[in-house]
Image (spheres, grey):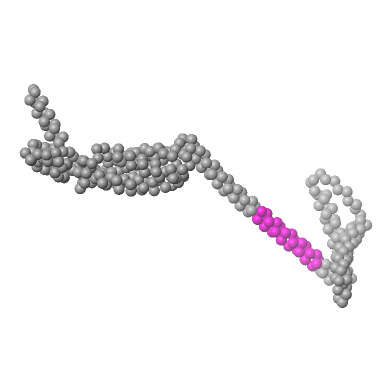
C-alpha cells in the first residue's frame, strides 16, 4: 500500500511538470500553450505545442506551462473628476502571453494581474481628474487609449501583450445620476415647450392669413355686388328714359327709391324676429326720404370741395405766383 501511494505521488508530480501526456523521458504540450524547459534549474528552451523529449540524465525537465490564449481582467477604479464628482470606472483588459517571450512572462512576474491592475489605477487616476464628468463620458475612448499605450509599454518588457482595453461602464454617485436625469428631463421639457410654441405660432399665423383672405374675398364680393347693383340701376334708368319719353333721370331715381322703400317695408313685416320698428308711412314721407338722401349727397360733395379749396388756399398763400381755377 505504501509503494502504491508513493508511485501515485510520483505520477502526479510528472503530470504537473510535463503536461497532459507524459513519461519519464517525454511529454506533450497542448495547443495554445507553451512550455518552459529547464536544465539543472536554469531556463533551457521553450516547448511549443506538440510532443517533446527530455533528458532527465542531463537535468532537463518541464518547469511549467503558460497559456497563450487571450485572458480578460476586469478592474474597478474609483476616482474623482475635475468637477469633484466621485465615479467608478469598470475597465476590461484583454491580454495574452507572447510566445516568443514566454520565458520573460514565466520568470519576471509572479502575479501579472496585480501588476496590470496597479498600472491601470495609476494611469486612470492621473487622467480622469483633469476632466469634467460630461467630458469623461464623451472621451472615455481616449482614457482607454491612454491606459492601453502605457500598459503596452510596460507589460511588453515582461512578455505580455495588451490586446484591447474597454471602458465598460462609468458609474457616478447615485445623487449625481439623479441630478443628471433631472437636468436632462428639464432640457427636454424646455425643448418640447419651444416646439409647442412654434406650432401654436404657425397655427395663429395660418389662422390670421385665412381670416385676412376671407375678409379680402368678402370685400371683393361686396364690391362686385355693389357694382352689379349700380350697373343694374344705370341700365334701368337708361331703359326707362328711352321707353318713356319726357322723363328725366331724377324722376326715374325717385321711382326706384319709392320701390325700394316699399320692398324694405315688406321685408320688415315678414321678419320673424320680435322687434318693433316705428316708421312714418305716407306719400309725403317718401318724398322727404328722397330729399334727405339728396341733401346728404350734396353735403358730402360740398365738404369735399371745401377741403380741396382749403388746401389750394394754403398753397396759394405760400406761393403768390400760383393761381388755381376752381
Which residue is at the front of the view, 65 or 303?
Answer: 65
In this image, 1 relative to 170: left or right?
left
Which residue is at the front of the view, 255 or 208?
Answer: 208
The answer to which quarter of the image holds residue 218 is bottom right
**Residue drawn where x is 21% and y is 41% of the image:** 107
Q: Position of residue 246 (x, y in %)?
A: 89, 71
Q: Position of residue 219 (x, y in %)?
A: 72, 59
Question: Which quadrant is home to the N terminus?
Answer: top left
Which residue is at the front of the view, 315 or 212?
Answer: 315
**Residue drawn where x is 11% and y is 32% of the image:** 11
Main SS of the magenta part reads helix
Which residue is at the far left? 57
Q: Position of residue 99 (x, y in %)?
A: 21, 46
Residue 100 on the magenta span: no
Q: Position of residue 322 (x, y in %)?
A: 86, 76
Count of numbered badges drawn on the protein: 0
In this image, 187 relative to 105: left or right?
right
Determine if residue 39 is in view: yes
**Residue drawn where x is 83% and y is 45% of the image:** 275
Magenta part of the protein: which range? 208-236
Which residue is at the front of the view, 279 or 116?
Answer: 116
Residue 217 on the magenta span: yes
The answer to which quarter of the image holds residue 225 is bottom right
Determine if residue 243 is in view: no
In this image, 41 relative to 114: left or right?
left
Amino acid at each position: 500500500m505504501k509503494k502504491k501511494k508513493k508511485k501515485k505521488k510520483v505520477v502526479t508530480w510528472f503530470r504537473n511538470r510535463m503536461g497532459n501526456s507524459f513519461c519519464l523521458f517525454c511529454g506533450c504540450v497542448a495547443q495554445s500553450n507553451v512550455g518552459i524547459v529547464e536544465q539543472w534549474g536554469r531556463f533551457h528552451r521553450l516547448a511549443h505545442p506538440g510532443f517533446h523529449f527530455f533528458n532527465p540524465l542531463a537535468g532537463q525537465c518541464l518547469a511549467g506551462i503558460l497559456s497563450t490564449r487571450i485572458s480578460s481582467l476586469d478592474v474597478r477604479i474609483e476616482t474623482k473628476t475635475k468637477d469633484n464628482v466621485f465615479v467608478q470606472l469598470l475597465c476590461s483588459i484583454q491580454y495574452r502571453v507572447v510566445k516568443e517571450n514566454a520565458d520573460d512572462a514565466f520568470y519576471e512576474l509572479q502575479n501579472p494581474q496585480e501588476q496590470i491592475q496597479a498600472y491601470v489605477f495609476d494611469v486612470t487616476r492621473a487622467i480622469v481628474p483633469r476632466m469634467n464628468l460630461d467630458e469623461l463620458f464623451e472621451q472615455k475612448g481616449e482614457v482607454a487609449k491612454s491606459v492601453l499605450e502605457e500598459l503596452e509599454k510596460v507589460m511588453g518588457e515582461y512578455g505580455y501583450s495588451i490586446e484591447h482595453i474597454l471602458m465598460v461602464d462609468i458609474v457616478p454617485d447615485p445623487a449625481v445620476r439623479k441630478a443628471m436625469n433631472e437636468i436632462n428631463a428639464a432640457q427636454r421639457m424646455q425643448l418640447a415647450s419651444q416646439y409647442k410654441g412654434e406650432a401654436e405660432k404657425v397655427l395663429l399665423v395660418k389662422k390670421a392669413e385665412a381670416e385676412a383672405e376671407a375678409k379680402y374675398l368678402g370685400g371683393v364680393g361686396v364690391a362686385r355686388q355693389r357694382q352689379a347693383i349700380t350697373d343694374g340701376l344705370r341700365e334701368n334708368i337708361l331703359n326707362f328714359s328711352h321707353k318713356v319719353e319726357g322723363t328725366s333721370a331724377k324722376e326715374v331715381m325717385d321711382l326706384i327709391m319709392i320701390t325700394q322703400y316699399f320692398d324694405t317695408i315688406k321685408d320688415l313685416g315678414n321678419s320673424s324676429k320680435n322687434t318693433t320698428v316705428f316708421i312714418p308711412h305716407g306719400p309725403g314721407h317718401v318724398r322727404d326720404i328722397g330729399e334727405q338722401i339728396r341733401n346728404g349727397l350734396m353735403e358730402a360733395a360740398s365738404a369735399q370741395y371745401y377741403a380741396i379749396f382749403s388746401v389750394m388756399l394754403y398753397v396759394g398763400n405760400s406761393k403768390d405766383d400760383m393761381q388755381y381755377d376752381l
